[in-house]
Structure formats: C-alpha cells, structure tokens
C-alpha cells in the first residue's frame, strides 16, 4: 500500500536566506504515529507546514498519493489536519461551535451539516458542553481540545500536531494523550516531550539542521541523542 | 486570560438581535443618511432621533450607559470639528455637527452590539461591497484583538518587574511600540496560517444565517421609516419650539 505521506528531497529557504530544510525524506503509513524530535530551529515546524501546503519548497511532497500543488490545496487541507502549537492562534471565532465549524463551512458544507459535524467533533474530544462559550474563556487544555475538534470536524485522514503538550498541566496532558490514542487517524507529532512520545508514537525521527539524521524507536532515539 | 471583548453584547438575545443583518444594516444606512443630510439638525429632531435610538437600545436589552460610553469614542473627532466650526463663528452648526456625529456613533454601536461581525460582513457582501474592503475589515478586526492581547501581556510583564505610574507607562509604551508591532505581526501571521490550514479562501463563513422573516420586514419598516419621518417632518421643529416656550 502507498504511504499516506511521502516526502523526498524537500528543501526550503526562508526569505532572509536561512536554510530551514536541506533535503528531507520522510514517509508516513496508515495507522502509524511518528514523533518528530529535534532542537528548536532544526526544521520540524517548517517541515509540517509543507504537509498542509502552507509552505512550498523544492522537492516532492505527496499526500494520499497526490503531489501537493497550488491546485489541490483545498483537498490536501481536508486530508491533513494541522493542529498548531498555540491554540490561541487557531481559535478566532466568537464561540466554540462557530470556530469548530469554520473548517467544514470552508469545505462548502451546508450550515446544518457543518453544525452536526462540529458537534460530533466536540463530543469526540469531550468538549460538547462548552459549544456556546467564547474560546478565550477556556483553559489551555480545553483550548487544545477545541483546536483538535476544529481539525477533526474536517474529517482528516492524517493529524499533524505541533508541540501539543505545550502549556498543559499533567491532567491536561493525560487527557490529551487518552484522546489522541482513541483517534484512528495516522499522526505526526512534533514534540520535545519524550514521555508523551513514548506513550503515543510507533516510530520517531530526529531533525538536525533541516535534515532527518536518524530514525527508529522513541527509546532508541531518546537514548542516542540524550533527549 | 481575558484581554478585550467586543462581542459579549452580540451574544445576548433580544428582538433586535434576532433580526436579519441586512435589514439592520439597511436601517442604519437610512438613519445615517437622515442625520447626515440635515445641514443643521434642529433640536427637536435631534431629541426625537435620540429617543428613537434609546428605544432601540432598550429593545435590544443593551446597557444604555455602556453603549453611550462606547459611542463616546467619536467625541474627540466630533468635538474638534465642532470647536473649529464654532471658532469660525457658527456655534449652532458646531453643536449640530457634534450631535450628529454622536447620534451616528450610537446607531453604529447599536448595530455592532446586536450583530456578529460575520453577519455584518455577509450583509455587506450581499449589498455588493468590494471583497477587498471586506477582507481588510475582517483582518483589521481580528488583528485588533491580537494587538490588544499582546499589549496587555507586555504591560503585565513590565508591571511584574516593577514598572508603574502614568509617566513610566507613557515612556514604556513609546519604547515598546516597535516590539508590540513586531510580535503582533508574528502572531497575526500565525493566525492567518491557521485559517489557511482550515481551508480559508477569503470568505468568512457564517454558521447559521438568519432567514428573512415577516418580523424583519416590519423591523425595516419601523427602523428605517421612523428616522426618515422624523427628519422629513416639517412641523417637528416648530412643535418642539412651541413646547420649549
């Protein structure tokens, strides 16, 4: 079976000339959860932004067998749900339900169907009770779960989470872990949290200076790079 | 953390909140034209328009003092114009200018306090407002919140390190303006990316567009007809003058 995501020779340079990705090869198979390790600035976030078509470098990025191009971004963004590190950047509508419905409405669904999907997604993450509340009144953990619901409502086949445990207290972290383990999608998790990665990931890769320099089990890589 | 909230009032429930955004926008336009087209607003007409707005605020179950205070944001500009006009020798026109600008501001606050931004933007879109203008409004509004949040965080961080007092605040604010805009820009970029990631294509989707009902037609008739009738009523100034005597 073809990988869900297949990246080869991906290179990217920011406008100021800084090289962020210097030839990345990567694949993600169905049912897998891959942890991305690496120091700050090693290219992890830049890499995941390519998976959703938010950045476009040279090389090849294929999602669900399709090359990511400017012409199929809507479909790519439906397939790859990207949960950002800072939920405050992701939640911008007046109420939780409107925010979760933002993606489905952009997909062209009718409002009634978008609401139904949004309520399903909020049920899935255990946040249906806050559907009518303003996002900025929620705790960090609640915001994170609502942000995930916003992505789940688009029914993605792949979930990409950028440092999902940032700002979470231990119960929040535990709830997030339980939630992610329940979700059937293949996942890519950018994280510095090895305990979290150990609990969720089936495989890990290590980024350094815009390249993947090692791949293996979470324990192996954590020990090898003293992570 | 709660930085700035412009939308608490729009989440309330009232007969005015329930009305379709297009009729409220149309009524506002008529009100603004009625006020703006009067060269000098006679006091009885001004009082009648103010009472009409007050009725709207009560029907919308909004805090009257809060709305009047928020509309006061227009006073520095209106006051400047009024003073310049008064200095030019026309005190009556100056007072009229100030009154007209304040009444218009209250009417705008009444609309924005009873209608969410996505609803207003969709109404403007259906009135064929330029897409570019609507996009600018969307992002201006969103980034205003970002800027306010960033400013609050920076002020708290500074106060945690002992910065207090008006003079200090002024100096710190001037010094940190560049930092504020720099960090807000980064944050705004992040928000825009997050919107793109969920399929944003420049159109702001509304979850539950309200259907046009008979009540909307009645509302439009009353809310647009009343200011027009007040403005065009030739006897109202004379009646008011007689009453004042």
Image: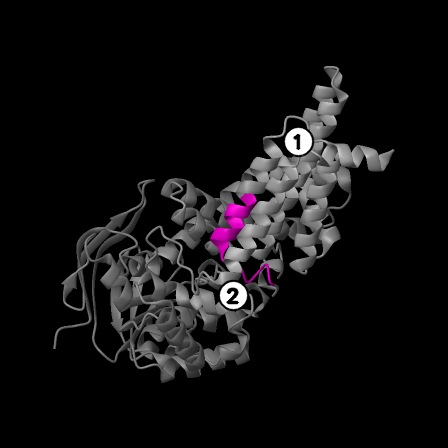
Chain of the residue on which disc 2 is drawn: A
Q: Is residue B243 above or below residue B111?
A: above
- Going by the picture, which residue comes out furthest to the right? B245
* A225 vs A198: above or below: above
Q: Nearer the viewer, residue B58 or B220?
A: B220
- Mark 1 residue element: helix
* Label 2: which secondary element: loop
Figure colour scheme: one colour
* Count of numbered circles in the view: 2
Q: Is residue B207 left or right of residue A75?
A: right
Q: Is residue A86 above or below residue B234?
A: below
Q: What is the number of the mark on residue B77?
A: 1
**Of the residues tagged 1 and 2, which is closer to the observer?**
1
Task: Give the image location of residue B161, x and y in percent.
Answer: 70, 51
Quarter of the image where the N terminus of chain B is located? bottom right
Residue depicted at x 78% and y 36%? B240
Chain letter belonging to callout 1: B
**Residue drawn at (74%, 33%), measured in percent from left and top?**
B237
Which residue was labeled with disc 2?
A: A95
Judge whether residue B115 can be spotted in this image: no
Q: Position of residue B65 (x, y in %)?
A: 75, 51
What segment is highlighted magenta in the picture? B15-28
What is the C-alpha distance between the residues marked 1 and 2? 34 Å
The answer to whether one can see residue A185 in this image is yes
Q: Residue at x 29, y 71 (%)?
A: A156
Q: Quadrant of the C terminus of chain B?
A: top right
The front one of A175 and B114 is: B114
Q: Is residue B30 left or right of residue B103?
A: left
Q: Are marks 1 and 2 in contact (CB under 8 Å)?
A: no
Residue A150 in the image, given as x and y percentages of width and height: 40, 69
Judge whether A104 appears above or below B235 on screen: below
Asked if residue B23 is among those painted magenta in the image, a careful observer would answer yes
């Amino acid at each position: 079976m073809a990988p869900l995501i297949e990246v080869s020779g991906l290179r990217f340079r920011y406008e100021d000339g800084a090289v962020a990705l210097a030839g990345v090869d990567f694949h993600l198979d169905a049912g897998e959860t891959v942890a991305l390790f690496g120091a700050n600035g090693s290219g992890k976030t830049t890499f995941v932004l390519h998976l959703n078509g938010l950045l476009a470098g040279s090389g090849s990025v294929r999602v669900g067998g399709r090359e990511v191009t400017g012409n199929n971004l809507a479909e790519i963004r439906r397939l790859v749900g990207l949960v950002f590190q800072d939920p405050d950047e992701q939640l911008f509508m007046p109420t939780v339900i409107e925010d979760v419905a933002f993606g489905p409405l952009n997909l062209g669904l009718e409002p009634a169907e978008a609401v139904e999907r949004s309520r399903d997604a909020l049920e899935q993450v255990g946040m249906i009770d806050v559907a009518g509340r303003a996002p900025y009144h929620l705790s960090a953990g609640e915001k994170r779960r609502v942000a995930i619901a916003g992505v789940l409502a688009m029914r993605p086949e792949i979930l990409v989470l950028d440092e999902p445990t940032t700002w979470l207290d231990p119960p929040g972290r535990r709830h997030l872990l339980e939630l992610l383990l329940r979700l059937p999608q293949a996942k890519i998790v950018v994280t510095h949290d090895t305990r979290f990665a150990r609990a969720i990931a089936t495989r890990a890769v290590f980024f350094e200076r815009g390249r993947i320099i090692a791949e293996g089990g979470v324990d192996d890589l954590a020990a090898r790079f003293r992570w | 953390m709660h930085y700035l909230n412009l939308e608490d009032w729009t989440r309330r429930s009232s007969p005015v909140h329930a009305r379709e955004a297009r009729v409220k926008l149309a009524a506002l336009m008529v009100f603004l034209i009625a006020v703006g087209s009067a060269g000098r607003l006679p006091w009885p007409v001004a009082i009648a328009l103010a009472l009409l707005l007050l009725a709207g605020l009560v029907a919308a179950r909004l805090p009257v003092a809060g709305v009047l205070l928020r509309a006061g944001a227009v006073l520095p500009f209106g006051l400047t114009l009024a003073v310049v006009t008064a200095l030019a020798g026309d005190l009556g026109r100056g007072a009229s200018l100030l009154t007209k600008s304040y009444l218009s501001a209250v009417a705008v606050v009444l609309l924005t306090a009873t209608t969410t931004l996505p609803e207003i933007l969709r109404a403007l879109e259906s009135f064929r407002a330029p897409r570019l203008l609507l996009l600018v409004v969307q992002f201006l509004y969103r980034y205003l919140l970002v800027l306010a949040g960033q400013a609050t965080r920076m002020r708290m961080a500074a106060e945690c390190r002992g910065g207090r007092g008006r003079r200090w605040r002024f100096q710190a604010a001037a010094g940190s303006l560049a930092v504020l805009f720099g960090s807000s820009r980064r944050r705004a970029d992040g928000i825009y990316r997050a919107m793109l990631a969920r399929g944003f294509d420049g159109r702001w989707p509304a979850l539950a567009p309200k259907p046009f009902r008979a009540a909307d037609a009645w509302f439009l008739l009353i809310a647009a007809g009343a200011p027009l009738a007040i403005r065009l009523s030739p006897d109202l100034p004379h009646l008011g003058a007689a009453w004042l005597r």
